Amino acid sequence: MNSKIAKTFENCRRKKRAALITYTVAGDNTKNNSLKILNAISKNADILELGFPHNTPIADGGQIQESSHRALRNGIKLKDVFQIVKKFKIFNPNKPLILMGYFNLIYQSGESNFLKKCKDAGVDGLIIVDLPYPENKKFSIKCKKKSIDFIQLVSPTTSHDRMKKIIRDSHGMIYYISMLSTTGGKLKVTPKKILENYNKIKSINRSKNIVIGFGITDKTISALKKADGLVVGSQLCKTITNSLKKRLNAAKVLNKMVYKLKKKII
Amino acid sequence: MKIKKGKLLIDQHDKNFMYGGKFGGNFIPETLKKPIDDLTKLFAKLRKDKKFLKERDEYFKSYIGSPTPFIKLENLTDYLKGAQIYAKVVSEANGGAHKIYNATVHCLIAKKAGKKFIVGDTGAGYAGKMLSMAAKKFGLKCKIFMGAKDIKRQRPNVEAIKKNGATIIPVITGSQTLVDAVSECMRYWVSNCDTTHMCVGSTVGPNIFIKICAWSTAQISRELFKQVEDEFGKIPKKIKLLNCVGGGSSAIGFWNEFMDTDAEFVGIEAGGPKNSDLHAAPLTNGSKIGILHGAAQYVIQDKEGQIGSTESISAGLDYPGISPLHCFLKDTKRARYTSANDEEALKAYQLVSKLENISPSLEPSHAFHEAIRLAPKLKSSDVIIVNSCGDSIKDKDIIKQKLGSYKR
């Protein structure tokens, strides 16, 4: 049976458009607010990535770091993250949700225990930033057994041979990192070049769903809309930061922003 | 878990780069896989290349000033009336600390890799100072990442870095100390790995950085082994090698050549202020294994896996993790680890610099505390050697503030 993530891509393909994938941090800026944000943006987002924050992230740029630190300062724990997912899934059972974070939190929970909690909460996929291929082989098999997609990452530095192996062992979605950067960097490669690389990956196996992330904003998204999916993260985190500063309702502001992003890729 | 005899410690990992199946590895973002792989291959080639080794040895001799002195601390020995106490005065190396070995080797490698830029992290400022020095010598453009708190407390080294023409990037996230400097430096490398070589300042991080650093600092024990043989005719049966450990680079270098001898290894961590719960001693205080900066190690953290806060008077030891190599040495019981608190380190600094002609920085002062504690309990046939791996000049502000005055 296909995962909810794979089904979402099929739906988008039928509608001849890219899937819109959002990233926000669980607990940013509070448990309730991050749930409100998820509920609000899920109207227009096809897949939701939810970060479980770590205080020593080695691949996140300033915007996401700020969101993570804000959530941690407000006392967010893993059990809260799972509760947010569970509550979200009550009203949005078919909306795919992917947890994203760093391996140490899983290591401390114990892999099996962590996956059980994911399953109970209704998590559809996992992105672990610092567990690359092939070190992630065993864990990704464990995920599949729980019907959770393990999302592999590929980057501009990934060799063709390595890419083939990664794609062979991948599940419902593959994440292509658009450029050499932490999250939220300014797009320093042309969309044309990014799509060229994207097509090279796609040609290895056309049935795989490949999304592009890093550096994608309302300014750059439409130029990349030929991809299977596009991830917007840092811009949303930055928008939360700005809404808090201006004492605006972050969920409302984000809803508008995601609506705007969606319109640019239809 | 066992250490193999006759095989370099750095090479005793499995195919996943784990020591004892538990420590180390490469927990890194996909983007860094290839640069790390390239560096791993290049280093494997270079360390077998006779021309490269000759070049390294020449720089060690003419630029770093190898060998550094090995001296008996006669006054301290007489004062404590026990074991004979010696010091390997690594602070006599060019720049004033052991960090120059790793910095020099990294610059040599960066040149071979055709890189024009080099970046590095620093805590006490020594790793940064040495990297900026070596970068200048080898014509590389250099950026140093340093926590804002450390910039304030290690002013002399900050000035040296600037004088060498390197750019200092203040790190204002998290605790604003070494742990954040390493993270920020790695983040920078993720974005610039195509043009830039990264030097990790200690035996921490992804496996290749542990290897390069330990391979470089091993020069300390290569020299010491000969010096001890010259002094005693052979390696004495009852000999203790005491070294402070933060990331652990000087200790690994100090012990490497003695791995298969009877020498006892004692690592001294930073216990932090006397009346504080905070410390930087994960091995002494039974911290659990976790992932930090790309490697599995004993690390100060909370139950969930968030990295914990640390505190120490010595910026160079103020790090929540510890080299996977030291975790391996601890679990195989080849080395034992203890800690000294801030006050004990300060007192040891005072005593040693009063009685002897050396002036250890606050990092090795932690090890001197253990020497002072142990020596009276031992016989005069016992030998204690302390690695005096840094000079106090960089700590003059802290010492002045704590003790009222600083003399050098």
Image (cartoon, coloured by chain):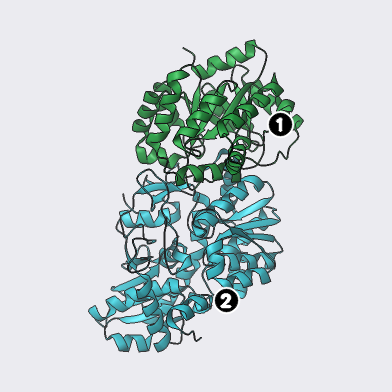
Chain colours: A green, B cyan
What SS does tag 1 mark? helix
Q: Residue at x 52, y 38 (%)?
A: A129
Nearer to us in this view, B20 or A4? A4
Residue A151 lies, in percent from the top left, at: 52, 28
Indicate left or right for B15 with B5 as reference.
right
Q: Quadrant of residue B404?
A: bottom left
Nearer to us in this view, A78 or B250? A78
Q: Is residue A24 above or below residue B28?
A: above
Say what amino acid the circle numbered 1 marks: Ile
Q: Is residue A70 above or below residue A95?
A: below
Distance CA(mark 2)–CA(mark 1): 50 Å
Q: Residue at x 39, y 77 (%)?
A: B346
Chain letter of the residue beneath label 1 in the structure image: A
Crowding around mark 1 (Cα neighbors within 10 Å: few <14, some 14 to 19, many 20+) is many
Q: Is residue B35 above or below residue B310?
A: above
Residue B32 lies, in percent from the top left, at: 58, 43
Task: Find disc 1 in the rendering and name its residue.
Answer: A194
Nearer to us in this view, A253 or B348? A253
Nearer to us in this view, A15 or B237? A15
Q: Residue at x 45, y 62 (%)?
A: B318
Total marks drawn? 2
Residue A162 lies, in percent from the top left, at: 58, 32
Q: Quadrant of residue B86?
A: bottom left
Indicate left or right for A68 with B58 as reference.
left
Q: Quadrant of residue B348?
A: bottom left
Which residue, as the protein is rendered here, is positioned at the far top? A14
Q: From where the camera sits, is residue B76 visible?
A: yes
Chain letter of the residue beneath label 2 in the structure image: B
Residue B65 is marked as: 2
